[in-house]
Amino acid sequence: MNLDEKIVKKNYIYNGKIINVRRDDAELPNGKPCIREVVEHPGGVCVAALTDDDELLFVRQFRYPYLEVIAELPAGKLEIGEDPFESGKRELEEETGCVAETYRDLGKFYPTPGYCGEIIHLYAAKNLTFTKQNLDEDEFLNVERIPLDKAVEMVLNNELRDGKTQAAVLKVKLLKDKGLW
């Protein structure tokens, strides 16, 4: 069975600094018309940086939509046309003051596929060297180290609620346990 839907017309409602919002006229696989609401986002990166002591580098920062401080792996928004891997390296150093000698691609993560086109590129990093943190002027965060096994427990206990962080933590743990990282 064909499951593809077709865009008939894109109708932009809002064009912002980070997102655009559309209310599209679309066509279902059976030919019937429908409306689809879409948030356009340039995408992002997330890096699970593992120290020689099996600790992951986390950042704690205030996340306005939830009005709370949350712990998550270093991450950031892609600039239009920016290479995700280069963005990941940049974000890791800016947020944690850390550069890695070795990286591994952990794949893509679709955080909200029902209405948002954001794709987050996940990476693991190791063989770390610490340089200098270089935060954006509107960025306020604290860096902390959490042992990998503790981070897995925190995911299972719903203490780490960020989806990209959960996925990357669990992938790193599985790869490490299988001797693949």
Image (spheres, rainbow, N blue to C red):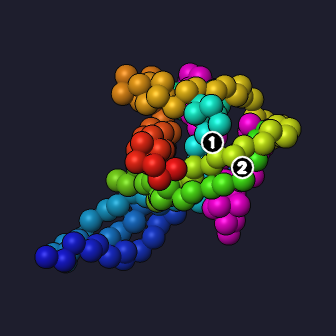
Q: Is mark 2 on a helix, strand or loop?
A: strand
Viewer-closest of 135 and 127: 127
Q: Quadrant of residue 140?
A: top right
Viewer-closest of 70 and 173: 173
Q: Is mark 1 on a helix, strand or loop?
A: strand
Q: In this view, does 90 lie above or below 50?
A: below
Q: Which numbered tag is attached to residue 49?
A: 1
Magenta span covers which residues? 67-96
Q: Residue at x 69, y 65 (%)?
A: 82
Q: What residue type is labelled 2?
A: Ala
Query: Is residue 152 something one can see in this rendering?
Result: yes
In this picture, residue 43 sits left or right of residue 151: right
Give the residue pinned by disc 2: 100
Query: Is residue 19 something one can see in this rendering?
Result: no
Residue 2 image position (x, y, % from top left): 19, 77
In this picture, residue 46 sits left or right of residue 83: left
Residue contact between numbered discs 2 and 1, judged by CB atoms under 8 Å: yes
Mark 1 surroundings: few (<14), some (14-19) or many (≥20) residues within 10 A: many
Q: Is residue 154 above or below residue 108?
A: above
Residue 142 image position (x, y, % from top left): 71, 25
In this picture, residue 153 sits left or right of residue 92: left
Q: Residue at x 63, y 48 (%)?
A: 125
Name the image quarter holding the N terminus.
bottom left
Q: What residue type is labelled 1?
A: Ala
Q: Residue at x 70, y 28 (%)?
A: 143
Viewer-closest of 77 and 97: 97
- Tell me, yes or no, whether the highlighted magenta stretch contains residue 88: yes
Residue 133 image position (x, y, % from top left): 82, 37
- Tell me, yes or no, whether the highlighted magenta stretch contains residue 179: no
Q: In which quarter of the image is residue 159?
A: top left
Q: Which residue is drawn at 45% across and 49% down?
A: 179
